[in-house]
Image (cartoon, rainbow, N blue to C red):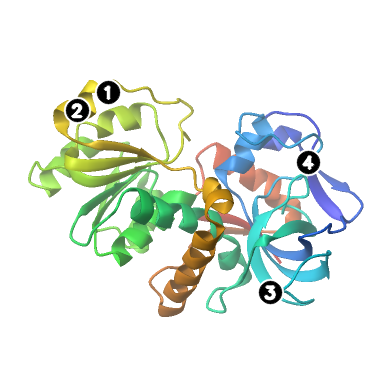
Amino acid sequence: MKAWRVNELGAPSQVMRLETVQRPRPGPGQVLVRVTGAAANFPDVLMCRGVYQMRPPLPFTPGVEVCGEIVEIGGEVAGFGIGDRVLGGTTLPDGGFAEYALMEAANTFAAPTALDDAEASALLVGYQTGWFGLHRRAGLRPGETLLVHAAAGGVGSAAVQLGKAAGATVIGVVGGSEKAAYAKDLGADVVVDRRTEDFVEVVKEVTGKRGADVIFDPVGGDVYARSTKCVAFEGRILVVGFAGGDITTTSLNHPLVKNYSVVGLHWGLYNVQEPAAVAECHAELTRMAANGSIRPLIGERLALADIAGGVQRLADGETVGRVVYAL
């Protein structure tokens, strides 16, 4: 089969190579799928660089989430059959940027019929991260103001839609006019182009100087530091990641003086600590997809041969919408 392989660490476009490799076989608790959709995520970029918290052994195939058709089932697997259309996380080193990928049955779910394969492949990581972040960690309530950084990115775009579905007023921050139009299409009430506007001032203006109740931050660095200047009394800053490259440090006297909370989210831990909650979340997201309140917006649908370029554009911040390898 054809698969993109990383044999050494570096920029995705430099280290990803399309190779012919042996098709993997599922072990106990695993299923093998024919990949029909594989969404690019920032963790794929970080793993290529060797700076993600999970470091698969070389060589490996990136692609952490897929939609596919089950073609082979390992031992000790119940509830799935050959031909089932599913989505979920992949089992590295046999990731989703390939013709076939391995998945753990425990982290595999029925793909919603309301979504096509490209859309379904982009449902797991971004929307589960957004849902657990906004509801479990930040406790977003109807009527509150939600500020979403990187609102045109994978997790940010999901947070915009989930925030609107929860009854919040959503302010999305993006970089560039094309991304601003995309954030409006997602449903953001107010869009800030950080290249021409100061999001701190916009938030204060929109909220009557009160500030944002919840700030969704997958960027970190200076974005986090400036977010502390526009968080509301008893607001919550949700730390989701550090796509900007700088891991944030903070002085604890500031949350004390301003009465706000800094809340972290590592969604992957729920797969270990509370797998039943992950399944319940997927059921809720499936219902939301069916009623039209969420839908991943695909910016690029690529052939397998073109996926390395898409991952590099994601790394460079040049993508709008989700980048997906899809049949």
Q: Is residue 20 above or below residue 245?
A: below
Mark 3 or mark 1: whose residue is earlier in sequence: 3
Mark 2 or mark 3: whose residue is earlier in sequence: 3
How would you rate the neighbour count of disc 3 (Cα within 10 Å): few for under 14, some for 14-19, many for 20 or more? Answer: many
> Is 102 on the left or on the right of 299, as rendered?
right
Amino acid type, label 3:
Arg
Q: Which element type, helix, strand or loop, lies under badge 3?
A: strand
Q: Residue at x 71, y 58 (%)?
A: 104
Q: How far apart are marks 1 and 4 (CA)?
A: 40 Å
Q: Which element type, helix, strand or loop, lies under badge 1?
A: loop
Q: Which element type, helix, strand or loop, lies under badge 4?
A: loop
Q: Which residue is drawn at 37% across and 22% down?
A: 249
Q: Which element type, helix, strand or loop, lies under badge 2?
A: helix
Quadrant hosting residue 240: top left
Image quadrant occupied by the N terminus: bottom right
Image quadrant occupied by the C terminus: bottom right
How would you rate the neighbour count of disc 2 (Cα within 10 Å): few for under 14, some for 14-19, many for 20 or more? Answer: few
Q: How far apart are marks 4 and 3 (CA)?
A: 24 Å
Residue at the disc numbered 1: 252
Residue at the disc numbered 4: 60
Residue at the disc numbered 2: 256
* Whether residue 202 is visible: no
Percent across and percent down for residue 55 are 69, 34
Front residue (pair 75, 313): 75
Amino acid type, label 2:
Leu
Q: Distance between the residues labelled 1 and 2?
A: 7 Å
Percent across and percent down for residue 283 are 50, 71
* Whether residue 235 is visible: yes
Q: Answer whether labels 1 and 2 touch (C-beta < 8 Å).
A: yes
